[in-house]
Amino acid sequence: MAFRDKELTVPGTVEVAGRHVKRYHIDQPDRRLEPAVVAAAYEYLPQLLAGPDDGTPPASWVVLHRGADSGAYLLAYSWFWDNVVECRIAVAGQPALDCPDDDPAHFVPMPRPGVGCVWELGVLEHERAAWVRHVLAPDRPDLAGYLGDTRVEGPVGR
């Protein structure tokens, strides 16, 4: 099967478990994320976010990605120690990753230490640069500026 871009949308920032979370969704070109998958993912999200405050602005971003098969992937990236990213992932509907069934709304922790696939890593590239631009480089961190700086919606993958 030939490689193809997928569609990235940015549904906005939410506050979850005391953290500001920028949200990104990656859909198949011919199949959007189902509302039940989105609801299940955001119900599961607090389990993936970083723990206690270490003085770093409480910011994270999440990528919810619908696979081409039965799988759905929820990746939560949280900043800590001012300049380090922690990644925690949950998967659903992907038996190859030890999911108990093929339900894309039944999220479980991912058993492998991944950081993202080629479609998700485009968001990570943007978020790293935005963090430097708004939080690390200025004399005073601009959390609001960081939260407002999202990757452009549209094709993602190349």
Image (cartoon, rainbow, N blue to C red):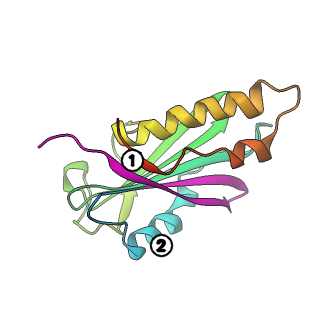
Residue 133 image-quadrant placement = top right
Judging depth in this view, the residue of 6 and 111 nearest the camera is 6
Q: Is residue 89 magenta?
A: no
Q: Position of residue 31 (x, y in %)?
A: 28, 65
Category of crowding for the residue at label 1, using alpha-carbon neighbours closer than 10 angstroms: few (below 14), some (14–19), many (at least 20): some
Residue at numbered disc 2: 39
Count of labels in the image: 2
Instruction: Give neighbour class at mark 2: few <14, some 14-19, many 20+ (Cα, 10 Å).
Output: few
Q: Judge whether 22 appears above or below 54 on screen.
A: below
In the rendered image, residue 99, in percent from the top left (x then y), is placed at 27, 58
- Quadrant location, the N terminus: top left
Residue at 70% from the left image edge and 53% from the top image edge: 19
User: Which quadrant would the C terminus be assigned to in this image?
Assistant: top left
Q: Amino acid at mark 2?
A: Ala
In the displayed structure, 80 sits above or below 105; it is above
Viewed as shown, does residue 116 lie left or right of 148? left
**106 to the left or right of 83:** left
- Between circles 1 and 2, the one closer to the viewer is 1
Task: Name the residue at 45% across, 37% down.
Answer: 122
Query: Residue at (38%, 58%) from the top-left corner?
Result: 108
Q: CA distance from mark 1 to mark 2?
A: 23 Å
**Stretch in magenta:** 1-25
Dot 1 amino acid type: Pro
As drawn, which residue projects farthest toward the right?
139
| SS category of the residue bearing label 1 | strand
The residue at which mark 1 appears reads as 155
As drawn, the residue found furthest toward the bottom would be 36
